[in-house]
Image (cartoon, helix red, strand yellow):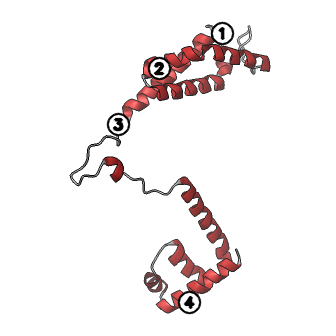
Amino acid sequence: MSDKNGTHERVAPKNLMALEELLASRMPQLYHAAARVLQNPQDSEDALQDGLLSAFIHLNQFQGRSRLSTWLHSIVKNAAHMQLRKRSRSHTTSITDDTADEDGRRADEVLVDSRPSPEEECAREERSRMLIERLGYLSPNYRSVVQVCMIEGLLRREAAEKLGVSMATVKSRLHRACKLLVKHA
C-alpha cells in the first residue's frame, strides 16, 4: 500500500484483515470475472487463485488510484486471459471417447504412462544415492564391477568384456561386493 506521499510500505496486520474482508465479499464477483473469460469452472478457479496470489505478492504496488476491488478485478481478469493464452497454445485430445484403433483398442488403453510414479522415482534416487555413498567401502576391483553391472546396467558378459576379466570373476566380485555393501548398510 502507499501513503499520501506515494511511498510504499509493508501491509499492516489490520490492513490484512481488511483485505480478507474485502476478498470474502468480492470472491464471487472475482470468480465470475474469470469465468466470463474462460467458460470453464476449473480454469476459472485456477485463474482466480493465480490472480489473488499475484495481487498478494504485489500488494505493495497498489497505488490507490482506483479502488482496491477494481485493482483485484483487473488482476484476476489478466490471470484469466493468461490461462486462455496457455490453453490456445496447447492442443488437447480427449482419451475418454469410445473410438478405437484398427485393433479394437481405445486410446486410454493404449496410452499408458510407463514412467515411474513419483514414489518409485524417489525410492530409486534414494537407492542410487545410498549405493554411491557405500561404493567408498569397496576396493577398486569390486567398485568397477558394481559400477558397470548395477549402475550402468550391463549384463555380466558385457561387464566381463568391458573390464577385461572372465565372467566368473565378474560374478564372484559382484557377489562379494554386494555382501560388503549390505554389511555397510
**Do the numbered discs 2 and 3 sit on residues whose CB atoms are within 8 Å?**
no
Q: Which residue is mark 1?
A: 64
Q: Residue furthest left?
A: 102
Q: Residue at x 71, y 77 (%)?
A: 184
Marks 4 and 3, how far apart in space? Answer: 54 Å
Residue 164's place in the image compared with 79, above or below, is below
Report helix, strand or loop for mark 2: helix
Q: Which residue is mark 4?
A: 172
Marks 2 and 1, how far apart in space? Answer: 26 Å
Q: Is residue 121 left or right of residue 11?
A: left
Between discs 2 and 3, the one toward the N terminus: 2
Between discs 1 and 4, the one toward the N terminus: 1
Q: Which residue is mark 3?
A: 91
Q: What amino acid is found at the position of numbered circle 2 in the picture?
A: Ala
Residue 18: percent from left, percent from top = 73, 14
Report helix, strand or loop for mark 4: helix
Q: Which residue is mark 2?
A: 35
Q: What amino acid is found at the position of numbered circle 4 in the picture?
A: Ser
Between residue 28 and residue 156, name the one nearer to us: 28
Marks 2 and 4, how far apart in space? Answer: 67 Å
Q: What amino acid is found at the position of numbered circle 1 in the picture?
A: Gly
Marks 2 and 3, how far apart in space? Answer: 21 Å
Q: Give neighbour class at mark 2: few <14, some 14-19, many 20+ (Cα, 10 Å).
A: many
Where on the picture, by quarter, is residue 8?
top right
Q: What amino acid is found at the position of numbered circle 3 in the picture?
A: His
Between residue 61 and residue 21, name the one nearer to us: 21
Residue 125: percent from left, percent from top = 58, 61
Report helix, strand or loop for mark 3: loop
Between discs 2 and 4, the one toward the N terminus: 2
